[in-house]
Image (cartoon, rainbow, N blue to C red):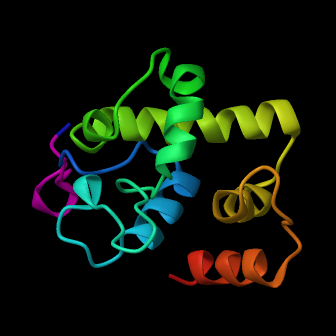
Amino acid sequence: ANLGPKHEINITNDKPPENNLIALIGNYETKGTQNPYSFVHPETGDLGKYQVSPDTLKSDAKLYLDRDITSQEFLNSPELQDRFIDKRITRWRNKFGMSDDEIIKRWNVGLRGNIESKQANEYLKRVKTN
């Protein structure tokens, strides 16, 4: 079918997997950065488009990527970053039964953090209104 110029599909390599929750987190975490996948936060050292902490990457890479990975390998691979967040969110939803809002809050405070904290709730609000 000819969709014509109004319906052209723009495909780029910098888009996350087709998951609205992943897009929300990625767009918020690296908003305004020129190269989100290679971005390292100057204060926290968090890595890439989804701002994964180096400690989280070190402890969880095998679980979500089936192998250990260095921070540099992670930064150099949009595919690994997208797979990491996709598998992490899927696990959180399936294993722990988390809602989208809970997942967004957990992305900010971690699995052991208080998702009812002011910080977590403010993060949720900022991500959803980004």
Q: Specify whether 75 is left or right of 80.
A: left
Give the magenta part as a residue range.
2-11
Q: Is residue 96 above or below residue 117?
A: above
* Relative depth, front residue between 99 and 78: 78
Residue in the picture at 58% in, 31% down: 60
Residue in the picture at 18% in, 53% down: 10
In the image, residue 94 lies at what x, y percent?
Answer: 79, 32
Q: Specify whether 92 is left or right of 31.
A: right
* Relative depth, front residue between 47 and 100: 47
Q: Specify whether 44 is left or right of 122.
A: left
| Residue furthest top as drawn | 66
* Relative depth, front residue between 30 and 55: 55
Q: Quadrant of the N terminus?
A: top left
The image shows a total of numbered marks equal to: 0
In the image, residue 48 lies at what x, y percent?
Answer: 35, 54
Q: Quadrant of residue 69?
A: top left
In the image, residue 79 lies at what x, y percent?
Answer: 31, 34
Q: Quadrant of residue 29?
A: bottom left
Residue in the picture at 25% in, 73% down: 33
Q: Is residue 119 magenta?
A: no
Main SS, magenta region, reads loop
Q: Quadrant of residue 96?
A: top right
Q: Is residue 97 above or below residue 102?
A: above
Residue in the picture at 57% in, 84% down: 129
In the image, residue 93 lies at what x, y percent?
Answer: 77, 40
| Residue furthest left as drawn | 5
